[in-house]
Image: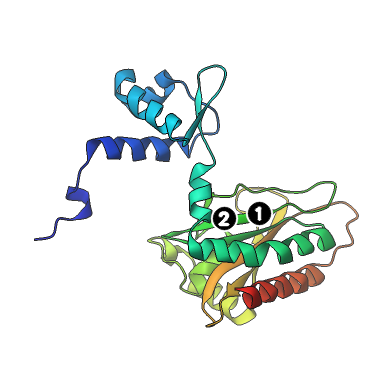
Amino acid sequence: MKKSKRSIQIPALDRGLDLIEWFAKQSEPATLTQIAQGLSLSVSEVQRPVACLHARGYLNRSSSAAYFISGKIVDLAQALPVHFKLRQAAHGPMAIFARTCGESIHLSVPDGDAALLLLDVPGGSLVRLSLQEGARLDPVRTVSGRILLAYGAIRHPESKKVEQSVLARIRKLGYESARSFQVEGITDTGVPVRNGDGKIVAALAISCLKMKGSSKSAKILLKGLISCAETISDGI
């Protein structure tokens, strides 16, 4: 009989993965004492796995002996063949869009039950937004997530909380635009990205600040976003 995944226990590996997952949610470096408290363990129980992760490059150490997660996890994700090819095809068109329209633009891909922010290209305006590459986006509360949900690229236990009419509208219009769930004054707009077989493989989106006296047209930005997505699709 096959054992379920939950029945397979490798204590040292489990502890290392627990540490990585815990660090990924921290916004500030943490000392061994803080790490131990965060994981409800003793300092002696986290000391060796932290040292190992630091030696392998998964954690960085500050001058005050506090640890924080490195970019190695993101580098590994980006090295996946499907992600590498998509980044290669997307970076050029996204950079042109950011320079021409002045808006930051980001690309998200399916990652289990969430959307993974694979690539972010800052805009050329004086005030611009920047999103964290490697972040996992809520598929219910974000434009990129709902686009991937609408086309069945990801599935989520709470997807029923999104009205089917909303997902149907996304499929009908071919895009989604809504106020940011997390930040006031920001409107997110996104479109799907397809591969050569017509399958949705990513969501391309912009997050626009409401600027005083701005003459940017939402229709023009959407047109540019759609064109950018089509160029990426052609390059995959």
Describe residue 177's horizontal placement relative to residue 4 as left or right.
right
Describe residue 21's horizontal placement relative to residue 192 as left or right.
left
**Cβ–Cβ under 8 Å for marks 1 and 2:** yes
Query: Within 10 angstroms of label 1, few (less than 14), some, or many (20 or more) residues?
Result: many
Under mark 2, the amino acid is Leu
Residue 187 image offset from top left, x and y in percent:
70, 58
Image height check: is 138 above or below 226? above
Residue drawn 56% across and 67% down? 202
Residue lying furthest top: 64
The CA distance from mark 1 to mark 2 is 8 Å
Residue drawn 77% across and 71% down? 224
Residue to which mark 1 is pinned: 120
Describe residue 72's horizontal placement relative to residue 186 as left or right.
left
Secondary-structure class at tag 1: strand
Residue 189 visible somewhere in the drawing: no
Looking at the picture, the colour scheme in use is rainbow
Residue 112 image offset from top left, x and y in percent:
41, 60
Query: Within 10 angstroms of label 2, few (less than 14), some, or many (20 or more) residues?
Result: many
Residue 39 image offset from top left, x and y in percent:
35, 29
Q: Which mark is residue 65?
A: none
Residue drawn 41% across and 66% down? 155
Residue to which mark 2 is pinned: 117
The quadrant of the image that shows the C terminus is bottom right
Residue drawn 41% across and 33% down? 53
Under mark 1, the amino acid is Asp
Q: Nearer the viewer, residue 16 or 162?
A: 16
The quadrant of the image that shows the N terminus is bottom left
Residue lying furthest front: 55
